[in-house]
């Protein structure tokens, strides 16, 4: 059931197996938008050979003063000195608008994304999995962001499957496509309901433009609208049928249906 969403009941408690960790090397690295394509190429080259201790994402976003930028959010859990050496080429590129990387608690690193997602906004999301970032894909990702209609919207190139995530056996959880290199997450956020059509259309057009570079499948929590056939595609046929059988056992009336829904097996 892990990864099956809110389809099977209400979770009343969690029991976590935690791993001890001290300070991590993380934060925000801001690159000028006119250097975003080269920055993404360096990010891709870095993640292609990165050890398990490095995770992260690069975000195309708009800063509070209206300046567009490529923002890397790395997280390194090895020795600080080794992380400094590994990230130095990325930190020297641009040169950066600002370099806010440094040692910090893991919890502080995790809280950074809250700054990109203010509460109370209107949202529309779409996503692709990608196994590589070709020069053409990078160029398209950057060019499409340039027309963003809302300063709160952003595009995220999120590293997934190059390390331990991809080594989990495929049948171990409901989550599929663990071996994908990246998720490209297109997030439109705006305030005024009158702007719904323009902001939703921007994500849809962005998604269509980047579709030729997609590797298939998607992570279901990154989609605003998911039809029944797309839910099946998100899990794959075999996993979906397994989850539908679980749904039939624990929620045969499909009470939990206000989600990316898995219907009970017939």
Image: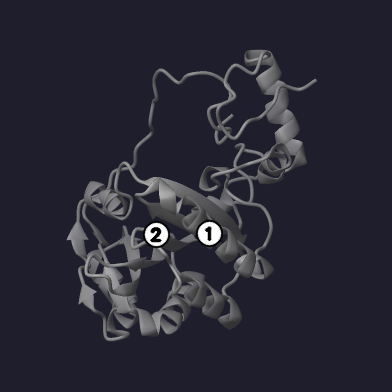
Q: Is residue 92 left or right of 9 when viewed as pictured?
A: left
Which image quarter: residue 87? bottom left
Residue 195 percent coordinates (x, y): 43, 53
Q: Residue at x 59, y 51 (%)?
A: 178
Q: Say which residue label 1 marks.
A: 203
Q: Say which residue label 2 marks.
A: 153
Is 193 located above or below residue 65 in the figure? above
Which image quarter: residue 98? bottom left
Is 240 located above or below residue 68 in the figure? above
Per the image, label 1 sits on a secondary structure element best described as helix
Q: Residue at x 59, y 35 (%)?
A: 260
Q: CA distance from mark 2 to mark 1?
A: 9 Å
Residue 96 percent coordinates (x, y): 26, 80
Q: Residue at x 45, y 55 (%)?
A: 187
How many numbered markers are drawn?
Answer: 2
Q: Quadrant of the C terminus?
A: top right
- Can the viewer see residue 162? no
As rendered, which of 246 and 225 lies closer to the eye? 225
Q: Earlier in the sequence, mark 2 or mark 1?
A: 2
Visual colour scheme? one colour
As rendered, which of 196 and 77 lies closer to the eye? 196
The crowd level at tag 2 (other Cα within 10 Å; few <14, some 14-19, many 20+) is many
Residue 71 percent coordinates (x, y): 33, 69
Is 132 located above or below residue 231 in the figure? below
Q: Are marks 2 and 1 in contact (CB under 8 Å)?
A: yes
The crowd level at tag 1 (other Cα within 10 Å; few <14, some 14-19, many 20+) is many
As rendered, which of 261 and 170 lies closer to the eye? 261
């Amino acid at each position: 059931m892990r990864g099956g969403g809110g389809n099977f009941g209400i979770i009343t408690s969690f029991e976590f197996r935690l791993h001890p960790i001290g300070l991590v090397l993380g934060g925000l690295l801001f690159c000028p938008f006119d250097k975003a394509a080269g920055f993404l190429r360096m990010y891709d080259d870095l993640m292609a050979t990165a050890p398990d201790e490095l995770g992260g994402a690069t975000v195309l976003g708009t800063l509070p003063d209206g300046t567009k930028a490529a923002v890397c959010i790395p997280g390194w859990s090895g020795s600080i000195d080794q992380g400094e050496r590994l990230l130095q080429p990325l930190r020297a590129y641009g040169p950066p608008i600002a370099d806010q990387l440094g040692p910090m608690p893991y919890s502080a690193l995790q809280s950074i994304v809250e700054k990109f997602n203010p509460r109370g906004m209107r949202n529309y999301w779409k996503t692709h999995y990608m196994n590589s970032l070709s020069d053409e894909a990078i160029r398209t990702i950057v060019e499409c962001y340039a027309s963003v209609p809302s300063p709160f919207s952003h595009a995220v190139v999120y590293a997934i499957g190059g390390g331990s995530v991809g080594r989990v056996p495929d049948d171990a959880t409901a989550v599929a496509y663990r071996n994908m290199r990246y998720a490209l997450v297109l997030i439109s956020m705006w305030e005024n309901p009158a702007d719904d059509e323009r902001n939703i259309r921007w994500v849809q057009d962005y998604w269509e433009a980047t579709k030729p570079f997609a590797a298939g499948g998607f992570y279901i929590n990154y989609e605003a609208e998911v039809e029944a056939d797309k839910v099946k595609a998100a899990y794959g046929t075999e996993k979906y049928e397994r989850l539908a059988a679980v749904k039939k056992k624990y929620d045969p009336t499909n009470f939990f249906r206000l989600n990316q829904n898995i219907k009970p097996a017939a």
